[in-house]
Amino acid sequence: MPTCKLCLSEATLRNSHIHPEFLYRDLYNDQHQLMGINGEGHRGYAVLQKGLRDSLLGDCCESFLNREYENPFLRDWIDAGVPETFRDEGVVYSVKVPDYARFKLFHLSILLRASWSGLGTYADVSLGPKHEERIRRMLLGGDPGKAWLYPIFGYGVADLRGKEPWPILSRPMVTELGGLRTYASIYAGVAWNIGVASHLSREFSTLGLQPDGTLHVIATDFRDTVEAKLAADNLRAAEAGRPVAAELHGRASRMEYRGVNGIRGIVRGHR
């Protein structure tokens, strides 16, 4: 019998989401479709009906993560409308999250599931046995660890010209920030950067999420993000017969992108 990745007990594995389904909510059109940009085929995207999933967790652990970390984030961040406040480019917004531990562990739960996953989309996410085991124990024990351990920093991502949200969910991308190996992923209106190391980065720790719940978020226009540029490159390359390896998820709508009915490119202004 297979083993649940979180509790390590034998269990019938569910087709677990990597990013919770509510993070895709604003990406769906009226037909519950979204656009997965992958640079493949003549269009460069695939029409999807739901977010990516993998066989990772048993029922009990799936419910545990949903109850302890996902529902609080949905309530305190998305339903509270926090991302909608990031509207002025370059401004540093100071946000106070009500539950530091659950907020931090929510983001770590996504990163850990991406590292566990065998899906090609998450092939670049490899935390290694030491970090996977440490984060697994942190999640089970509700322990956020020291503030410098897996620090989290965010850039608010929106259409700052139109003063409106820019719905997107991107796969974690490996980068470096403050001397730390960092995984950056856009969801819930923010490009979340999580540092992965066993040593202190004072720069990252100072700017990042604090134990008192304070989080500093810098507002950024989506046109300036690496993810937007990769998405545009993928769509252009696919049309020219030169696929590029990168994947993001953008919103489908009844508008057109290069004359393709039913799908809107997530990078407006790059036609």
Image: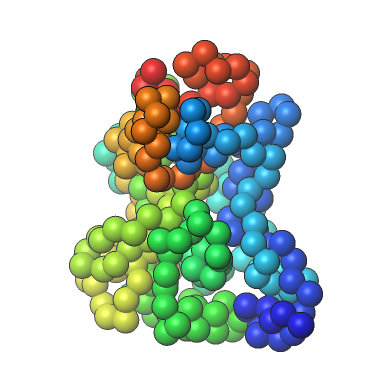
Q: In which quarter of the image is residue 8?
A: bottom right
Residue 116 spot, x, y in % from top left: 54, 70
Residue 122 rendering spot, x and y as whole percentages: 48, 59
Q: How many marks?
A: 0
Q: Can residue 55 be seen in this view?
A: yes
Which image quarter holds the N terminus? bottom right
Q: Place residue 201 in its image quadrant.
A: bottom left
Residue in the foreground of this view, choosing between 161 and 185: 185
Residue displayed at 62% across by 78% down: 5
Inspect this view and state whether residue 221 appears: no
- Of residues 40 and 127, the one nearer the viewer is 40
Instruction: State the image coordinates of residue 225 (x, y, percent, origin top left).
Output: 32, 40
- The quarter of the image holding the C terminus is top left
* Side (left or right) of 16 relative to 203: right
Is residue 225 left or right of 79 when viewed as pictured?
A: left
The residue drawn where x is 45% and y is 82% is 129
For the point 44% across and 37% down, the residue is: 39
The colouring scheme, among rainbow, by chain, secondary structure or one colour, is rainbow
Farthest residue, direction front = 241
In this rendering, the answer to whether 65 lies above or below 171 is: below
Q: In which quarter of the image is residue 200?
A: bottom left
Vertical order, 100 against 7 (above or below): above
Q: Which residue lies furthest to the top in this view?
A: 259
x 49%, y 28%: residue: 42
In the displayed structure, 13 sits above or below 50; it is below
Q: In this view, does 148 lie to the left or right of 85?
A: left
Question: Residue 145: horizontal and vertical position, in percent?
Answer: 44, 80
- Is 114 situated above or below 142? above
